[in-house]
Amino acid sequence: MSLHTSHRALVGFAFFTYLGLTVLIAIVPAASIQQTPAIRGARSAVAEQGRAIYLREGCGFCHTQFVRDLPLDRPYGRPTVAQDYANENPPLPGTQRTGPDLSNVAARQPSDTWHLLHLYNPRAVVPQSVMPGYPWYFEEKAEAAPGDVVVPVPPRLVSAKGRVIVARPEATALVTYLLSLRQPELPR
Amino acid sequence: MVIVRKSEGFGGARRRGQDPTLQPSTIVDPVTVHVAFEYLTCATFWLLVGTVAGLLDAIKLNWPDVLAVPWLSFGRVRPVHTNTVFWGWSSMGLVGLALYVVARTSRAPLWSPTLSRVSLGLWNVAAAAGLVTLSVGVTRGPQEYREWVWPVAVMFAAGLLLNGVNAYMTVATRKIPEIYVSNWYILGAFCFLPILFTTGYIPFYQHGLGNVVIQGYYMHTAVGMWFTMLSLGISYYAIPLILGRPIYSYALGVLGFWTNILFYTLIGAHHFIFSPVPWWLQTTAILFSVGMMVPVWAGGCNLLLTFRGTSAVLQRTFSAPFLLAGIVAYILVSTQGTLEAFRTANMYWHFTNFTVGHSHLSMYGFVAFVIWGAAYGLLPRLTGSEPNAILVGIHFWLALLGYIIYVISISIAGSLQGLSWVAGEAFIKSVEAAEPMWLWRTAGGVLMVASHLVFAVNVWAMRPGRALAHAPVPPAAEAAT
């Protein structure tokens, strides 16, 4: 039965060759390394909500969470290990670094006010930034109500004098998630 | 292959083009022609949608506050762009042509045109649902090319399986003993995508780092085992047909097929070099990335050598230059991919925009150009309707110039980013370094989108006209060529 004349043989051979290779190179390695002990405690419910917003807005298309053991990655923290991705569903190593790596952003930039301002309009804090702003997670009000998280937006970015910018729960959740991105110490 | 140029017992054709002898094919079942045309029409629609989305994201890197509304935000448009051009444009375009190639080289009508139309419906619904869900933020997160949530993915997979069955049954009912090499690639592709698609979506082995291993495998083989396979299969039919000469070496085509399966499948981990993914897996990926030179140079040069001494045809038609450009891009992009896999090169270029240039060189320079070349080469022979040659020329030069500007500028941007990072500068310096190149990239993108509008006009001009409806019924079996 020749592969040149038998469609059954040809398709069967191609199908099972590829399936076999898939099992060997992808499924078996993935299954064997997926169970690593977590070194990070579980996130708060609010931080998890923030992570869902991070996924929804596609932040991971420009920000990696993957520090390589290379000199150029030193500013972002220690090299990422398998345990860093444990319980992350999905893990967000990323393939593009249009913006900086965020594996350890909370250590680098611990201020929640900075993050809120940055999310409202990145150019308010980094003039050369090309990151999109997320003004829809904020509200412009005449005056703040008790319990409101007021964001100190520069007056030039507010539509009318005297009005205040208040963070919606989504914005504070996203900031809570970003501030949870702190690399835990590796167990010795 | 025989170039079908004349038919008997036929008159009153409405001719739009320049070839006075052009008539609809009399040896192909008209329903198969209609199905192929329907696929290409839908593909063209998604090409326009998908590339306008891409252009919008390019513009947003120049002017970040343009159209600042949630559903047009950069991070939401990005997966809309990639998934629409992958599963909408490229898949529909390639499969429309592939179904025709399968039927034609089997000397048999398409096994079930109805099945293919159902598949096309499913794919259109999936592409539309994918666009809407991703725009409103319903997503599986930034897992490239598998961002669609599972109900959308299931619809696409169902269409895929139906088309696979159809292609297989068409070959199974062939009127000649041999299976032409195009059908190796096409039937192969219909085996591989269901496997890799399913592997990408089943969650049991994808906790933590397991997900990263699957992501590398998935995004890499989606390109290599689906888009590349179909593009090569179509090239092995269209290039000899349009040039009117046999393929340089049939055996090299077969060698390319098997080595492509072996090497391409094993190299997904090269997307995560220096990661916690096991070192042996990364090294295997790098080694076989070098091995990829075998199928690429065997297949690419085989098709290239078929072009040897055909400058007359290249000057006379525009389909041949499209295909030639596509094959050249195939060789370039695959060689570039091998180089990028080396650890030193990876250090400079990984995470940078260089990757974006690489993916456009493959999905645009190679895949899109093959679709266009084959569409311009085959459709007029089938429908009897030709596009305006000048408009085809405008499409060619806008697309070629546009994507060359795009790829060169974005590759420079990527290199500047890499150099800035290695020099240890503040991160924002890499943004500033890339900014002027991003403007050039947008300029290239404008030309590319403009060329797609011209293509849409040309597709409409190639629609099956009255001529096809009146074409004589094809003979049951045609003498082997």
Image (spheres, coloured by chain):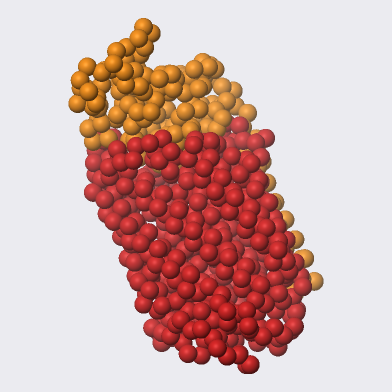
Q: Position of residue A90 (x, y in %)?
A: 55, 32
Q: Quadrant of residue A133?
A: top left
Q: Position of residue B431 (x, y in %)?
A: 27, 40
Q: Quadrant of the C terminus of chain B?
A: bottom right
Residue at 22 percent across and 23 percent down: it is: A160
The residue that appears at 49% across and 37% down in the rendered structure is B136
Q: For chain B, what colour was chosen?
A: red
Give above or below for B214 relative to A120: below
Q: Which one is in front, B156 or B274?
A: B156
| Residue toward you, B13 or A179 | B13
- Residue extending farthest right: A1
| B379 sits left or right of B309 in the view | right
Q: Nearer the viewer, residue A98 or B341?
A: A98
Chain letter for the orange colouring in the rendering: A
Q: Is residue B280 above or below residue B22?
A: above
Q: Is residue B109 visible?
A: yes
Residue B81 position (above or below residue B3): above
The quadrant in which residue B96 appears is bottom right
Residue B256 on image: x %, y %: 58, 67
